[in-house]
Amino acid sequence: MIRKYALISGFLLLFFGCHNSAENTNEQSTNQIFTKSVGGPIAKDLADSWVARKRSHSGGREETFTVTADKLLQLLNQTDNKLGVNFHFAQDPGEQQHLFIAPVKSDLKSWTNGPVLDAATNEFADATQAMDWALSHKNQHPDGPWSVFFGSDLIDEITSKEGLDKIDIKPGEKEDGSDALLLFVSCNTQTTSGKLKSEESTYDQGALCPRLCPVE
């Protein structure tokens, strides 16, 4: 009898030890993927070609979301110690598409740091409602994309640009058929002669879910 209990106890210790080890491994893997350095520049002509490919496979329809510099900075300033930003695809009850931008800390939770910014309207939205609409999109699109994460290093680089005006955010499709989310950053500065000079830079390389998903 004692031997039987010893075997059972050993099995339980082994089972829970493996379970905890798996959880620790998953947490470590997540921490290694979602870092401040996620995201980087991409050539504009390549970004344009990915947007065009997505448009050609979407019946000629192109989705463009836009946020202005002032609203983006207001959003980012509400959260300290940011790890990065999550961009969540969402769908409202009227089947209109939205893209919610949420700053995240190391816990990667999108819906606990105050209002989020809706890139479809350039207005702030309640986080609880945004979460419900993001879940609705996920249910309607089981293969994704659901969200994209960009690290704070890239976001800081963008927001520190002189004359930052707006960011156009466009879904794209790469040559291999995988999804992408492209950031087209527009800046307006004055030349020495007083003329307005417009510049645009493009960014990609976000961690795209469901291929890579933060643990909510």
Image (spheres, rainbow, N blue to C red):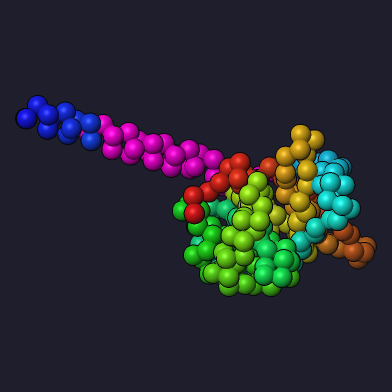
The one of 192 and 108 positioned closer to us in this rendering: 108
- Front residue of 99/149: it is 99
Q: Position of residue 107 (x, y in %)?
A: 46, 53
Horizontal side of 32 relative to 189 (left or right) equals left
- Name above or below for residue 81 compared with residue 205: below
Q: Is 6 left or right of 197, judged from the image as shown?
A: left
> In this figure, what is the number of numbered marks?
0
- 128 left or right, relative to 55: left
Q: Is 161 covered by the magenta stretch?
A: no
Residue situated in front as seen by the camera: 104 or 199 = 104
Image coords of residue 137 (percent x, y): 65, 58
Q: Residue at x 87, y 52 (%)?
A: 59
Question: Residue 134 at x, y = what percent?
Answer: 61, 61
Residue in the image at 92% along x and 64% along y: 195
- Tell which residue pokes out farthest to the left in this image: 2
Q: Is residue 198 visible?
A: yes
Q: Is residue 38 visible?
A: no
| Residue at the (54%, 69%) spot, across then down | 128
Residue 138 location (% of width, % of height): 62, 55
Q: Is residue 16 left or right of residue 210?
A: left
Q: Main secondary structure of the magenta part?
A: helix
Task: Identify which residue, 10 or 105, lies in the foreground.
Answer: 10
Which residue is painted at 84% across and 46% down in the image? 57
Which residues, given as a range, are shown in magenta? Answer: 13-40
Q: Is 32 a magenta residue? A: yes
Rendered-image quadrant of the N terminus: top left
Residue 204 lies, with reference to residue 137, above or below; the image says above
